[in-house]
Amino acid sequence: MAFMRYRALPQGEVTVDEFRAWLSQFDADRDGRISQGELQSALRSLHLWFAWWKAREGVRAADVNRDGAVDGDEEVARLFAFAQRHIHVKITQLGSYY
Ligand SMILES: [Ca+2]
């Protein structure tokens, strides 16, 4: 039985490198790019509502060269900024359980 267990985002302040390391585990086809579907899995692992919608908005916000996936330093940095704006609240909430 295949049970995927994902590492959680570090609690508190997350650096772009930590974010990238966390994100890379959802790169299912290991092509070094995060597609909308892969981003959706990442958001689901955070138990976020509207993961599909947020994944679409995240790729839209980050995908500078419009190839449909997030790759490269600039796009990851833009996705990180998007995540801080849109999922940061949830990350802090998760922290309060411990
Ligand atoms: Ca891209």
Image (cartoon, grey):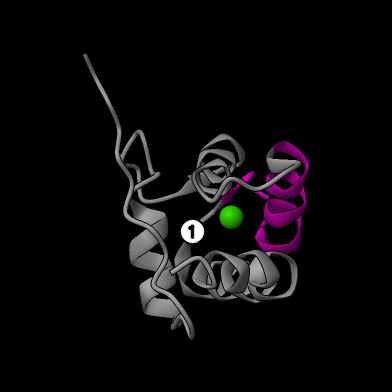
- The quadrant of the picture occupied by the C terminus is bottom left
Residue drawn at the location 65% of the way across and 76% of the way down = 81
- Seen at 74% across and 66% down, the residue is 86
> Where is ligand 1, by quadrant?
bottom right
Residue found 24% across the figure and 20% down from its top: 2
Query: Which one is in front, 11 or 80?
Result: 11
Which is more toward the observer, 2 or 68?
2
Q: Which residue is nearer to you in this view: 69 or 83? A: 83
Q: Quadrant of the N terminus?
A: top left
For disc 1, the neighbor class at 10 Å (few under 14, some 14 to 19, many from 20) is: many
Name the amino acid, label 1. Answer: Asp
The residue that disc 1 covers is 71
Q: What is the span of residues highlighted in magenta in the rendered image? A: 52-69
**Quadrant of the image occupied by residue 63:** bottom right
Q: Is residue 32 left or right of residue 81?
A: left
- What x and y, as percent, mark residue 84? 65, 75
37 falls in the magenta region: no
Ligand 1 contact, mark 1 (Cβ < 8 Å): yes
* Residue shown at 30% from the left, 32% from the top: 4
88 or 77: which is nearer to us?
Answer: 88
Q: Main secondary structure of the magenta part?
A: helix
Residue 48: horizontal and vertical position, in percent?
65, 48
Residue 56 belongs to magenta span: yes
Q: Which corner quadrant of the image does residue 49 belong to?
A: top right
Name the image quarter holding residue 79: bottom right
